[in-house]
Image (spheres, grey):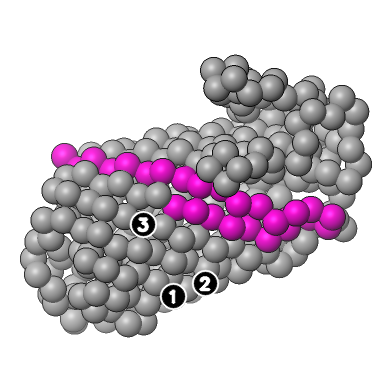
Amino acid sequence: MKGITRIIRAFFLLITLVGEAQHNGSDVMLENDKRSFHYTYDNDLFAGSDRYYTQGSIAEIRHPALSKWPLSKLLHRIAGGNDMTYCLSFRQDVFTPKSIRNKTLDSTDRPYAGTFFFSQKVISNWFWSKLTKSVDIGCIGPAALGEEMQKFIHKHTGNQEPIGWENQVSNSFAVNLNIWLEQGLYLSKWFDLVMEAGGKGGITNVNGAAGLMIRAGKKAEYFPGLTMPSQQKWECYATVNGTGSYVFHNAVLQGVPWKNSIYVLTRDRLVRFVYKLDAGLTFSVKDVSLTYTQSFLTPEFKGGWHHSWGGCNIVYRF
């Protein structure tokens, strides 16, 4: 493990040295983003369905003072940098079968599941490169309050109450380490092409992924160091992001090995290669940004369906 850690640190140190040789200063919006509040809400209601990843929400605060937190220091040691953003977030995700009206278990479907995480995240920027490292600490199962959240929303939106949550994945603590690298391939005033790669390791997810992101429109620079106007008063741009993942383990489908759940999927029912496409539109004025994203996901298990959902994100920089 120590040997692997040294290799990773040496690799990102090399990137840092290259970035230092070419760095030209960062955009004002990027600097302001280091002190900001982000809120994202996803729901498949935006795609006209009520199944699988049915809803999720993330509240995130970014502030330099978070650099003093122990987890931030740990993440910084994995791979540091000279342009850092420190983040703290809370996330809840809710997953259901394709039908929430079945009174009996459907052995061809996925289980109910909920997850809740406290996350510490550190973003390291270099010239045309960005590395995001995060640690998730939380739980899976009834303690994540996925049942209560879905029933609350259905009650206050006039929808039918879901049936079957008593069969959800069992309670367990959860810890995950996530690493995501973004590398600019072509960056200009109106168009960006970015390569992405990374993975997750821990109790709820073990996977590796790679993809491409395209941004087009009037936008601030995505990476520090690009020679562009020092300030953007407003932005309006589209983003298309496609990723492919190889899945080793997914606890919201399989549960955890040391807990017996009433119903989970066996390992052989996982679809190992999963593809996701996100298409979004962002509009920003001064310190406020609004984004709507539509997501599409290929089946995660054999016999499963494709799935789509929408998400709204608001950012306030202070």
Q: Position of residue 245 (x, y in %)?
A: 63, 65
Disc nearer the start of the sequence (2/3):
2
Label total for image:
3
Q: Position of residue 76 (x, y in %)?
A: 35, 55
Is 313 in front, or is 128? 313
Quarter of the view holding residue 273 = bottom right
Find the magenta span and give its range: 293-318
Label 3 or label 1, whichever lies nearer to me, is 3
Which residue carries the number 2 mark? 211
Q: Is residue 311 magenta?
A: yes
Q: Position of residue 85 (x, y in %)?
A: 28, 52
Which residue carries the number 3 mark? 281
In this view, 225 is above or below 45: below
Quarter of the view holding residue 214 = bottom left
Which residue carries the number 1 mark? 195
What amino acid type should be assigned to the residue bearing mark 1?
Met
Which image quarter is the C terminus in? top left
What amino acid type should be assigned to the residue bearing mark 3?
Leu
Q: Secondary structure at mark 1?
A: strand
Q: Residue at x 34, y 69 (%)?
A: 215
149 displayed left or right of 220? right
Q: Residue at x 52, y 68 (%)?
A: 242
